[in-house]
Structures are given as structure tokens and as C-alpha cells.
Amino acid sequence: MPTIHIVEPTLKTEIGHCFSFIQSVCHAGPDAQWMVWANRSATVSFALPNVQMQRYFHRRLRRPQCLLLYRKLLRTGDKLFVSTASTIDLLLVHWAAQGQLPAGRVYLYVHWLHLSDRKVRWLNTIAKLQPDLMVFGPVPSVVEVLAQAGFRQARLVPYPAAVAAVAETSSGSCGDPAVLYAGAARQDKGIGHVVDLAEHMQRVGSTVPVRLQSAPNHHGEYDALTAADMQRLAGIRYPYLGKRRSNQL
């Protein structure tokens, strides 16, 4: 049975989406053989008999390492899945292929696209040269961009952890209202506004629970604004505030 290689250079801890995403994918294929290529300092374990870990990537060298790894894996009969793909990964896969790839060999999951004129040109060029790349997105807006660029195998694939969460809760009743912030504490995810809200709820004497993750990024770091927000968060004495640095809420 061919191995499916999951390439995720940022996978280091359970913080963020990478671990839960890959775990959900591997659980969905219990009969497959999975090889996960992660950060060289990764401390996670999937505890599944059909999943192996390769601690491989250096933070500063991950782009050239990706190119070399893609080239190596494409010489085998195995399948390749890039779980957090960007336009750079599409370009690197094309360079590594050294020819047109058949459908069903390489899969790339594009969570979001931060487009520029240059990146749009890249997508259009790669789609002409690699029209059968299997490219997935979690929302229609991402899939539409990929399809418009010319990728024939652009597909909408819901985020697996979200599907699992819906399945677990669909038969149950809704509990009491609460404010929930899940994910790493980042400015682009609105962590500053969440801290503002918690401060406001303390001032007005609210009793609605607030549960949030305050995890740093994959490298254990906060940017300056987020570090200031974390200091403000630490000073809030709202009795209904729960915060964790891990993925467990």
C-alpha cells in the first residue's frame, strides 16, 4: 500500500490548527499508511499505529527543504498532501515535479489566500502547467479563485475538525450562552477585540462566561501588540473568564 505523506513544516506542538487538522485526516483513513513531516523539534504524537512522524524541518530553512522533499517524494509511487498550502507551495511542487503531474498524485489544502498581482500571475501560470493538481479549499471564496486560475481539480472540502464538531453536537441541545475564542492569540484573529470585550463585561457586571485560548504562534512567540493584550488579559478580574494556552477549551 502506498504511503501518503503529509507535509506540515509548522507542526511543532498542539497549539494552533495543524495538529487537530492532521489528526482528523489520519483518523479518517484508518487503512492508509501516513507519514507526517513536521518541525524538527515537534513534541506531538498521534498515537495511531498507521501514522509515523518525521521530525525534519528547520524554521529558517523550511522553503528549500520543502523543494528538496517534494522532489524526493515525487520520485516514489507515494501520494503527497500539503496540509497548509500557499501559493509558494504550489510553485515549489511544480518546480519539484519537472513535468506535468497526473491527477490524484499531489493534494494541496489551501486554507486561505492573501493575493497580490504577482501571486495571481503565479496561480495562472501554475494552473496552465499543472492543471490536474488536486487543490482544496475550506470556503467557496478560496475554491473560486483556484478554479478561475485554471485548476480543473479545485474542490470545496470542509475543514475536518469542524465537521467532527458538528457531528458531535448536532444531536444535543444548546447549553447556556458563552463567548468562545478558539485559536492562537493573533491580531488578525481579533484577540485585541476579545480582550476589550472581556474588560467591558467585567465593568458592566456581566455573568456570561468567556472562554478563550491565549496560545502564542507556532514558534511560541507573541508580536508586540498581542503581548500587550496578554498583559491586559492577565489583569482582568472577571470571575467568568477562562483562558488556556493549549488547544483544549
Image: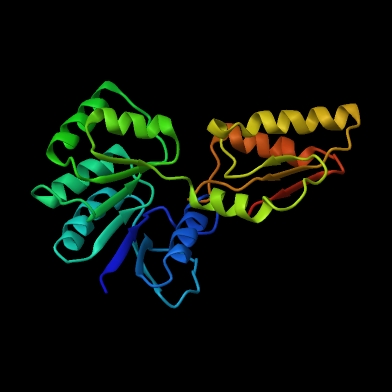
Judge whether residue 117 can be spotted in this image.
yes
**Frontmost residue, 87 versus 229:** 87
**Frontmost residue, 197 versus 142:** 142
Residue drawn at point x = 20 percent, y = 29 percent: 124
**Frontmost residue, 195 versus 167:** 167
Residue drawn at point x = 17 percent, y = 59 percent: 74
The vertical placement of 177 against 23, above or below, is above
Percent position of residue 220, x then y = 53, 51
Percent position of residue 169, x then y = 68, 52
Percent position of residue 69, x then y = 22, 59
Considering every residue shown, the one lying at the far right of the view is 205
Considering every residue shown, the one lying at the far front of the view is 171
Residue drawn at point x = 41 percent, y = 36 percent: 112
Q: Is residue 163 left or right of residue 172?
A: left
Number of numbered discs visible in the structure rendering: 0
Residue drawn at point x = 38 percent, y = 51 percent: 83
